[in-house]
Image (cartoon, grey):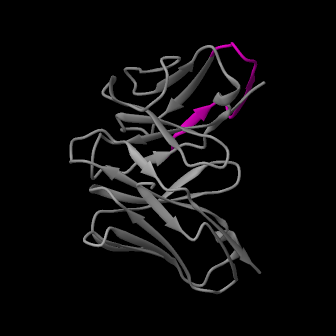
Amino acid sequence: DAGVTQSPTHLIKTRGQQVTLRCSPISGHKSVSWYQQVLGQGPQFIFQYYEKEERGRGNFPDRFSARQFPNYSSELNVNALLLGDSALYLCASSFAQGSPYEQYFGPGTRLTVT
Amino acid sequence: KNEVEQSPQNLTAQEGEFITINCSYSVGISALHWLQQHPGGGIVSLFMLSSGKKKHGRLIATINIQEKHSSLHITASHPRDSAVYICAVRRGHMDSNYQLIWGAGTKLIIKP
């Protein structure tokens, strides 16, 4: 079975541009979470979506938005990119929200903003 | 003080050694995760614990809810175990948002 997939794997953008990152969860999983991992730091929670609704949001500005589609795939959008948005963006899926549902992580999208 | 603390930050050992990585947390949790991150970024979930002990192959994870402490052990360590090991906890009740609070990670290097 395919695991969590993310696209693209690498991306280079310039300041002020907009970017869209994509995530496909494991088949049957209905919850998707997004995390940002800046180099040398632990991941920071951005969003959780479950059944196409936003169920949680971390401490990120409104430039960050996301959505979940009927097939449970998800997109993370970042507008007006800043140099500090350079990071590894991780997507994780789980069957549902909450314990005892384990999260499975994708390989990440490495975003570089120049 | 961080809500999730890991120790040590860095660990270098020889192949075959028994490895222990510790995680302490200061909040009430519903689950604790141990994850592995290799260079290049991909994160693999190793264990999810809410009590007791779990074992997968050479990996063992334990948790003591009363002491708010968990350990990850690696027996007969191998150079391919070299990675960053991350402890993350989920705060809250069964139905709350799945927001993980992450430790800073332990960078493990196993020398042949």
**Residue at 68 percent of width and 13 percent of height:** A17
Quadrant in the rendering for residue B15: bottom right
**Image coordinates for residue B73, horizontal then vertical, percent:** 49, 77
**A68 sits left or right of B64 in the view:** right
Q: Is residue A65 above or below residue B43?
A: above
**Residue at 70 percent of width and 49 percent of height:** B40
Q: Is residue A2 visible?
A: no
**Image coordinates for residue B90, horizontal then vertical, percent:** 34, 51
**B85 sits left or right of A93 in the view:** right
For the stretch drawn in magenta, what is the main secondary structure?
loop
Check residue A85 for magenta coloring.
Answer: no
Give the residues in magenta.
Answer: A1-18
**A66 sits left or right of B13 in the view:** left
Q: Is residue A74 above or below residue A103?
A: above
Out of A64 and B51, give the one closest to the viewer.
A64
**Residue at 21 percent of width and 42 percent of height:** B95
Check residue A12 for magenta coloring.
Answer: yes
Residue extending furthest front?
B1
Quadrant in the rendering for residue B99: top left
**Image coordinates for residue A65, horizontal then vertical, percent:** 48, 19
